[in-house]
Each structure stands twice: as structure tokens, then as C-alpha cells.
């Protein structure tokens, strides 16, 4: 989130007049386990309060699997609760979760059949798959990279992802999720993967940026971030 969202917004400077500031408040997590994810999510109210002190225009909740591991449809619960936290602080701001943004991004693309890459251990990856399928998105194939350490997730080479995607069963899919995790970088490889695979390619970060721009009532467009941010889906 702290790397790729600002990169997307900076790239947008070349085609649009708006300029952005970026503020962050961190929930602690070192290993991607169900226990640490629950503890992390419980800390999100504190983060929403701290960020709303800055009267930000939108809040983005970064951890996709923290939301999805809390149960079906939890992104709606989280977004509403954290928004109300900002309202009670007299600094109302919309909240975009990366989990909800991925769901929305795939629906916007009309992607009913999807292939997906995630850095998580297999049980958590299956949780993500099940969550998306309950949102009406069929996961045709998926790859769990099984990286437990959160810093190692961030250090994964994004340019390995198109090759991983090519080895998957993506025949007949409507889209490929190159990274179902905002911690695992993929932005630099999104357009390369689209050219290689011949289908729209998104990531949790790209979908989050798209929904954050829409929440700010700006055109959801940025160069170098793939089909979703190409301008074809700039307005709701």
C-alpha cells in the first residue's frame, strides 16, 4: 500500500491536475497467520481515528487477507464501522478496503471467471478463494506462494509473477489477479502480464487505487496500471 498506491497516484500526475498527500497509520503484523490477522484487524479503529485527525479525503485499509479471514462479506462491516469512526471524530471520510476493492474491481471488469496469485500459505489462500466465490467470482485456478514472513512478501520479485501466471490454467478466464495482496508488489509487471496473457490483469493495489479515486469523485485513471485504470472505467 505504501509503495504502489503512491506510485499509481504519482503516475496520474502526467495526465490530471490533482496532487495528493499520503498518510499512514500502521497495524502491527510480522507473520501472516490467522491469529496475527485478527489482532491486526482489531487495531484498525485506532488507525482510522489517527488518520481522520488529518481530515483525509479517503481511507484505504491495506490488508486484504485480514478482512477476508474475518468471514464472508466482512469488508462491508469493516468499511461501515471505520467510516463511522471518522464521523464520530468530526472528520468523515469514506473507507476503501483492499478486499472490497478487489471484489468491486472484478465486478467492474465483469470478470466472472478468474485466476489468482497470492503470497499466503495455502489455508489462507483458500480463504481468499472462498471469499471471492461467495461474492459471485469463480476462481478457475490459483497459486499460493506460501510466504509466511510479511517482509519476505514485500521483497518478492514482481517480474516473476507473469511467468507464474503463464503456468496456471487461465484459458477462458475474464481476468487474472496478479497479486491478491497489497504487500506483494506487482505494479511494474501488470501491463507486461496483460500483453502476455491477453486478458485484463489487476492486483489488490490497482483495485484499491481505482476505488479510492472514485471515492474522491475523481476520474479513476492512471497510466501504467493496466486495463482497470486505463480510463475505460474512470467513472461509476
Image (cartoon, helix red, strand yellow):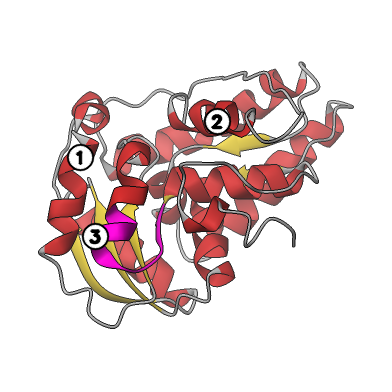
Which of 180/124 is in front? 180
Query: In this view of the protein, which residue sits in the foreground, 27 or 101?
Result: 101
Tell which of 188 and 217 is nearer to you. Answer: 188
The answer to whether 95 is drawn above or below residue 44 in the figure is below
Give the residue number, with chain letter if any, for mark 2.
11
Residue 101, compared with residue 172, is above or below; it is: above
- Alpha carbons under labels 2 and 1: distance apart: 19 Å
User: Residue at the location (83% across, 26% down)?
Assistant: 89
| Disc 1 target residue | 159
With 57 as the anchor, is 167 left or right in this view? left
Instruction: Pick whichever of labels 3 and 2 is earlier in the sequence.
Output: 2
**Residue at horizontal 66%, vertical 48%?**
220
Q: Is residue 150 left or right of residue 81?
A: left
Q: Is residue 44 magenta?
A: no
- The residue to which callout 3 is attached is 196
Extreme right residue here? 90
**Quick one: quadrant of the C terminus?**
bottom right
Vertical relation: 186 (above or below) 117: above
Label 3 neighbour load within 10 Å: few <14, some 14-19, many 20+: few
Disc 3 to disc 1, C-alpha distance: 12 Å
Residue 86 appears at what percent x and percent y? 78, 32
Label 2: element kind: helix
In this rendering, which labeled residue sits more in front, label 3 or label 1? 3
> Which numbered dot is residue 135?
none
- Circle 2 packing at 10 Å, graded few (<14), some (14-19), many (20+), is some
Question: Which stretch appears magenta?
Answer: 193-202
Q: CA distance from mark 3 to mark 2?
A: 23 Å
Amino acid at each position: 500500500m505504501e509503495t504502489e498506491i503512491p506510485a499509481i497516484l504519482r503516475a496520474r500526475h502526467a495526465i490530471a491536475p490533482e496532487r495528493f498527500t499520503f498518510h499512514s497509520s500502521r497495524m502491527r503484523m510480522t507473520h501472516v497467520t490467522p491469529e496475527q490477522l485478527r489482532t491486526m484487524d482489531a487495531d484498525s479503529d485506532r488507525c482510522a481515528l489517527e488518520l481522520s485527525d488529518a481530515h483525509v479525503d479517503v481511507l484505504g485499509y491495506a490488508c486484504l487477507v485480514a478482512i477476508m479471514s474475518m468471514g464472508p462479506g466482512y469488508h462491508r462491516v469493516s468499511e461501515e464501522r471505520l467510516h463511522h469512526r471518522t464521523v464520530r471524530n468530526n472528520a468523515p471520510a469514506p473507507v476503501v478496503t483492499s478486499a472490497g476493492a478487489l471484489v468491486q474491481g472484478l465486478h467492474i471488469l465483469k470478470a466472472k471467471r478468474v485466476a489468482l496469485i497470492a503470497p499466503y500459505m495455502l489455508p489462507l489462500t483458500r480463504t481468499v478463494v472462498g471469499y471471492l466465490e461467495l461474492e459471485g467470482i469463480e476462481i478457475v485456478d490459483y497459486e499460493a506462494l506460501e510466504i509466511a514472513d510479511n517482509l519476505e512478501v514485500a521483497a518478492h520479485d514482481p517480474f516473476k509473477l507473469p511467468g507464474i501466471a503463464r503456468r496456471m490454467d487461465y484459458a477462458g478466464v475474464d481476468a487474472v489477479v496478479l497479486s491478491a495482496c497489497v504487500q506483494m508488489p506487482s505494479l511494474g509487471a501488470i501491463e507486461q502480464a496483460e500483453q502476455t496473457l491477453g486478458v485484463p490483469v489487476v492486483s489488490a493495489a490497482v483495485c484499491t487505487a481505482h476505488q479510492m479515486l472514485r471515492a474522491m469523485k475523481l476520474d479513476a485513471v492512471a497510466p501504467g496500471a493496466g486495463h482497470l485504470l486505463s480510463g475505460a472505467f474512470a467513472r461509476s
